[in-house]
Image: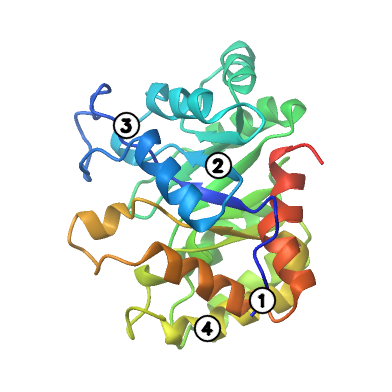
Amino acid sequence: MPALPPLACDSHMHVFDGRFAFAPQAHLRPPPATVQDYRQVQQRLGLARVVVVQPSSYGTDNRCTLDAVARLGPQAARAVVVVEPGADEAELGRLHAQGARGVRLNLARGAAPDLSAWARLLQRARPLGWHLQLHCGLSALEDLAPWLEGLPVPTVLDHLARVPPQADARALATLRRLLDGGRLWVKLSAPYLDSRAGPPGYGDMQDAAHWLLAQAPERMLWGSDWPHPAATAGEVPMPHDAALLHGALAWCDTQALADRVLQGNPAALYGFGP
């Protein structure tokens, strides 16, 4: 199994802090999982860099996420935020100055956004070098593909692009076309969301991971999805953080690929220093 690179990045985690109120419409309301808690995980796993992703629980109130980035340090942490599609250049600039490098759109629970408004938002975000982070089911990609192909910024798909075991061939063909376009990234995170085999190894997700790595190794990322909100809600069994990381390293057949996925690729996308 490849070794963990020295500047390994966790490209997908969340912080939940009781100092900040959940959005009234929040579906998931996890217990506190603070920066101090994450630092212990980070140290135990040997991770050097981190991307704090705004969870749906806080809506468009990014204070908790940005506070976490400030505490984790501007050299080692970045944010992906959630904003209203009408956010102007000044607001985006303020978020950028606080470490934001992308905006998240979560369609996993059936939201129906105004895609035209989102395209205009992403046009305003383009000069900042931002990307769209998208969480949706694999089956949704077929309808979204023309819109994604027309966006002015790259797209990052959450959680192994939600490719399930025995994925539909037509949906995989759409995903492959998007990957071949050169502007789609994927986070090799949260295999437990679609696995039927379950922990500790989520062995039935290995084929999806290998397929994705073969398509676009230069645009694959890894994330822990700590503190695993779906698990704290009882929707899936709680994973083991070390097992998730070791599993991702095992998916990378060579040290060069592991270095790419865990260090080089996130450094390029999120603008970490050399």
Identify the residue position indicated by label 3 in the image.
58
Helix, strand or loop at mark 3? helix
Depth-wise, is mark 3 or mark 1 nearer the camera? 1
- Distance Cα–Cα, label 3 vs label 1: 34 Å
Identify the residue position indicated by label 1 in the image.
252
Q: Check disc 2: other Cα within 10 Å, few if <14, some if 14-19, many if 20+.
A: many
- Left or right, 244 with respect to 57, comes to right
Identify the residue position indicated by label 2 in the image.
51
* Res. 216 in view: no
Identify the residue position indicated by label 4 in the image.
206
- Distance Cα–Cα, label 1 vs label 4: 10 Å
Spot occupied by residue 29 in the image (x, y as percentages of width and height) = 20, 41
Depth-wise, is mark 1 or mark 4 nearer the camera? 1
Q: Amino acid at mark 4?
A: Gln
Q: Check disc 4: other Cα within 10 Å, few if <14, some if 14-19, many if 20+.
A: some
Dots 4, 2 in contact, CB < 8 A: no
Dots 4, 3 in contact, CB < 8 A: no
The image shows residue 144, relative to residue 246, as above or below, that is above
Query: Given the current orientation, which residue lies at the most extreme top position?
Result: 90
Earlier residue among tags 2 and 1: 2
Of 92 and 169, which appears nearest the observer? 92
